[in-house]
Image (cartoon, rainbow, N blue to C red):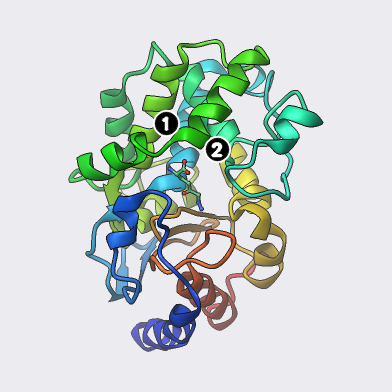
Amino acid sequence: MQKILENALEIGRKYIPEGECASYIPELAKADKNHLGVCIRTRGMETFSAGDTKERFTIQSISKVITLMVALQHCGFDKVFEKMNMEPSGDAFNSLVKLDLTSDKPFNPMINAGAITTAGYLVPDVSFEDMLNYARRLCLDKDIVMDEKVFRSEMDHCARNRAIAYLLQSKGILESDVEKSLELYTRMCSLSVTAESLAGLGLVLSNGGRHPETGERLIDKYAVQVAKTIMLTCGMYDGSGEFAVRVGIPSKSGVGGGILAVVEKRMGIGIYGPALNEKGNSIGGSHVLEYLSKELNLHMF
Ligand code: DON
């Protein structure tokens, strides 16, 4: 296994020069674009790591998976999808064009419009502290904290998300306090994780929401099922279709460079590689996953 991970990194690293770190949140531009790491945590409680797997980075959009599951558990399916669809958008993650012109609902909970709507379902009942505890438990990583610098940097440069949030309010989709919903969304994006934490989250999701060792239920099984399905169809934004064909593993990316991948009943995979492709997905990480999918026979079909 170790050799396969090393080979995967070698292939992934070749693509790093073609990618760039996100810069629209200034603090993210400071990342070292040459970092690349992959961690696998299996149902047999084995951990395999290669590369920069202890490096901390912000979870960004991968938090949308956690927020969605907590919202499903807290409010139920009907409420969550009353004002939100579950279809791929085919647009950039921060687009608001179709939301304004052709659709009265966000396309899905994995784009910014959908995730801000989902955060709104939690305000004011579920606090950020509650969400942080969910994140720590679900990622099997008690050391997760919020990266204050990234949070401030994003709050100072979130004109676009603020525009989306107020557009959602104007359409009667976001009914909670707009600024509080935006803040909860941004705080969740600023959680500081490692590739290993993402592998932990993947492992819990591959296990239907139960702790892999103790069997304790950490989150509703149904919420996990919905989240994994939406990860497969929408988790890699407008790159989701090609990624599903090439890799065939439900995955979710973030502009911090993380990718969470869930191999049903087998393992969780966490990736860190801050150089992104034009869709906002880790460029080295996407190739690492494609290689691992083929070598380890992980494609779901
Ligand atoms: O709201 C944003 O734009 C960021 N906090 C998260 C975006 C993101 O991670 C998109 N991922 N590929």
Give me the residue at 39% from left, 49% from top.
Answer: 201
- The answer to whether 72 appears left or right of 152 in the picture is right
Q: Quadrant of the C terminus?
A: bottom right
Residue 202 horizontal/vertical position (percent): 43, 53
Marker disc for residue 18:
none
Residue 263 horizontal/vertical position (percent): 53, 60
Badge 1 residue CB within 8 Å of ligand 1? yes
Tell me if label 1 and label 2 are in contact, CB under 8 Å: yes
Residue 31 horizontal/vertical position (percent): 29, 64
Q: Which residue is mark 1?
A: 185
**Disc 1 residue crowd, few under 14, some 14–19, many 20+, Cα 10 Å:** many
Give me the residue at 59% from left, 15% from top.
Answer: 169
Dividing the picture into quadrants, the one containing residue 197 is bottom left
Amino acid type at image mark 1: Tyr
54 versus 111 height, above or below:
below
- The answer to whether 181 appears left or right of 196 in the picture is right
**Between 264 and 18, the one nearer to me in the picture:** 18
